Amino acid sequence: MVKLNNVQITLWAIIKGIYNVYFHPLAKFPGPKLFAASHLALSYYMATGQSIHNNRELHAKYGEIVRTAPDELSFATAAAQNDIAARPGLPKHPRFYIQDSRVPSSILSVLLVLIFLLDS
């Protein structure tokens, strides 16, 4: 097993962030560089319950289509979503199509399993 030290992990994160911002297939869409670099900013706003307000501000600043994470776009209108979904060369991630029986289908499934295990 390969052990990584802190320098290697930091270097990997920096290189990955640069790739996400400048070379990722979604790099041409507008949005804050911090959001494009990693999921941390989006995760923060989701965890604090501010993602809806933040998205509204981002759309006011950047327009109908905003890059909110390295691999995510936010659409202000249905027409904008249809424009992007119909574009060739932007394949959708398989997680949207493949249902893995080993992965819970919802948070409710996870909660029910936890309740069952705690009652046992």
Image: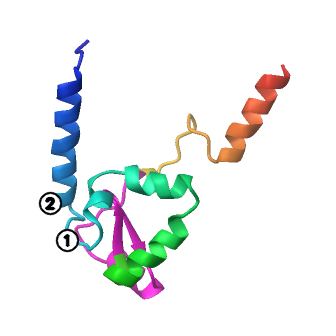
Q: Is residue 79 above or below residue 18?
A: below
Image point 20% across, 45% down: which residue?
Answer: 16
Question: 61 or 21, which lies in front?
Answer: 61
The residue at which mark 2 appears reads as 22
**Residue 53 position (above or below residue 104):** below
Q: Amino acid at mark 2?
A: Tyr
**Amino acid type, mark 1:** Lys
Residue where numbered disc 1 is placed = 28
Quadrant that contains the N terminus: top left
* Vertical comparison of 47 with 59: above or below: above
Residue 77 on image: x %, y %: 46, 85
Q: Is residue 13 above or below residue 72?
A: above
Q: Is residue 90 covered in magenta?
A: yes
Circle 1 SS class: loop
Residue 1 appears in the rendering: yes
How many labels, in total?
2
- Residue 97 appears in the figure: no
User: What is the span of residues highlighted in magenta in the rendered image?
Assistant: 66-94
Tell me the CA gap for discs 1 and 2.
8 Å
Q: Which mark is residue 39?
A: none
Crowding around mark 1 (Cα neighbors within 10 Å: few <14, some 14 to 19, many 20+) is few
Residue shown at 22%/68% (left/top)? 89
Helix, strand or loop status at disc 2? helix
Left or right for 40, reference 3: right
Q: Position of residue 25 (x, y in %)?
A: 21, 62
Q: Mark 2 and mark 1 in contact (Cβ < 8 Å)?
A: no
Q: Is residue 8 left or right of residue 1?
A: left
Residue 71 location in percent, x, y? 33, 58
